[in-house]
Amino acid sequence: MFASVGSASAVKYVKSWGSELDTSKLLRTPVAMARDAKGFLYVVDMGNNRILKIDKNGEVVDAIGTLGEGPGQFNMPFGIAVDKEGNILVADTANYRIQKFNEEFQFIKSWGTKGKGSEQFSFPREIAVDSDNNYYITDEYNHRIQKYSPDGQYIQTIGSYGKANGEVALPQGIAINKQDEVYIADTYNNRIQVFDKKGEFQRVIGTGIAGLGPYQFYHPRGINFDSTSGSLYVADTYNNRIMKFTNKDQFLYTVGNFFQFVYPNQVFPDGKGNIYITDTGNNRVLLYNEVGLTAVMKKTIGNERNGNTQYAGPYDVERGTNGNVFVSDSFNHRILKYDISGKIVAKWGSLFGTGGPLRFGSLPGQFFVPRQIATDRYNNVYVSDSVNHRIQKLPIQG
C-alpha cells in the first residue's frame, strides 16, 4: 500500500505485471491497449511481438505471439481493436498485414502483404470499426485508408496521395461519427476530409492552405467527437489552438492562440460541457467550460515544474466512469486524479516534495515515464509504465 503525497486520500496498490523476473509477464514497449465488452484488457507488447489478455483482477489469462510470419506470430505489432462481435484485430505492422482472432485467441484469418496494391499495406497503423462492423485501417505511408468487411474481404480504398478532394498526405487522426461518416485528419494537407460509409468523398473542412482563419488549419492532429452533441473538436496543433465545429461541420469557435498554447496535441470533450486540452509544449492540461458559443478557462492544471500540481510532459488524459479525470504526468513519473471540480484527489507515483527530486523506480506504485491510460467499467485504471516495460493496474477509488 502506498499513500498519495500531499493528499488526504490514500491509494492502495492493486497489481502490476511485467516484472523483469517473470518472463511470461515481461513487457517490452507496450504500445496500445483495447477493451472488450466483457472487461478484458488486451495489451500490444510490441517488443515481445505478442498480445496479452488480462482479466479484471489484473491476471494474465492468455497470450499469443512470437516473432515470425505465421498465423499468431507478429513483427512489431502496433494497433489493436475489438470489433462488435468481440473479435480481436491486430495491425501486424512490419509484416504488413492484419490478423484477426476470436476472444480465445484462436486464429481466424489474416490479410495483407507489403505493397501499394489493394489488400497491401505500407505500415498499417490504426484500426477503427463502424456500426456495421466494417474495418477501417490507416495505411499511413500509402497515404490512404483501406476498408474491409467483417470477414476481412477488401471493400475499397479511401484516399490517395495528393491535394485534391479525396486525396490525402500522411493522414494521422481518424474518427467515425454516429452516422458512420469517416473523418480523417489530412495532416500534411492542412484540412479535415469527410467520407461516407461507402468511402465516397463528401466534403472537406478547411481551405487546405495553412492559416489562422475559421476554416484553416496548420497540421491538425487530434480529432474527437462529443458523445452527447456530436460536435467535432480538432487540435489545430501548429496553430496552437482548438477548434470546435457543429455536427454539421459549421465553425463555432476557437480556443487558444500562440500566447496560450504550445503545440496542443489532444482535446477531450467529456460530453458534459467540459473540454480537456493537453497543452503539451507548456507541460500542462487546461480545463475549459463551454458557455454559449465560446469556452471559458475554468482551471489551469500544472506547468513545467514538478510540484504537487505542476506537470512535466503530460502525455494522456482519460475520464473515468464517475467523471473523474486522470492525467499521466510522464516526466514527473506519476498519475494524477482530479474530481469534476479540477481538484487533485489522489496521486499514483510520488515526489520528494514540491520542487524536489523525482522519485521514479520499478517498485509497485512507482513509474518511469508513464504514458497511456485506460479505464474499465469496474473502476480500475491501467497505466502503460513505458520504461519499466509493464502495465500497472490501480483502483480509481483508493
Image (cartoon, rainbow, N blue to C red):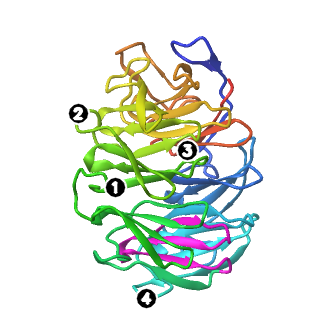
Q: Secondary structure at mark 2?
A: loop
Q: Secondary structure at mark 4?
A: loop
Q: Which residue is mark 4?
A: 117
Q: Are marks 3 and 1 in contact (CB under 8 Å)?
A: no
Instruction: Name the residue located 38 percent from the left edge and 33 percent from the top edge.
Output: 331
- In space, the residues marked 3 and 2 are separated at their CA atoms by 38 Å
Instruction: Name the residue located 52 percent from the left edge and 42 percent from the top edge.
Output: 269
Q: Secondary structure at mark 3?
A: strand
Is residue 141 covered in magenta? yes
Crowding at dot 1, Cα within 10 Å, few <14 / some 14-19 / many 20+, comes out as many
Q: Nearer the viewer, mark 3 or mark 4?
A: 4
Type of amino acid under label 2: Phe
- In space, the residues marked 3 and 4 are separated at their CA atoms by 37 Å
Q: Are marks 3 and 4 in contact (CB under 8 Å)?
A: no
Answer with mark 3 or mark 2, whichever residue precedes in sequence. Answer: 2
Say if residue 235 shows up in the picture.
Answer: yes
Q: Which residues are magenta?
A: 125-151
Q: Secondary structure at mark 1?
A: strand
Q: Which residue is mark 1?
A: 220
Type of amino acid under label 3: Arg
The picture places residue 303, in percent across and down from the top left corner, at 34, 25
Q: Which residue is mark 3?
A: 390
Of 371 and 272, the residue lying toward us = 272
Answer with mark 1 or mark 4, whichever residue precedes in sequence. Answer: 4
Type of amino acid under label 1: Pro
On residue 229, the disc is none
In the image: residue 143, left or right of residue 57: left
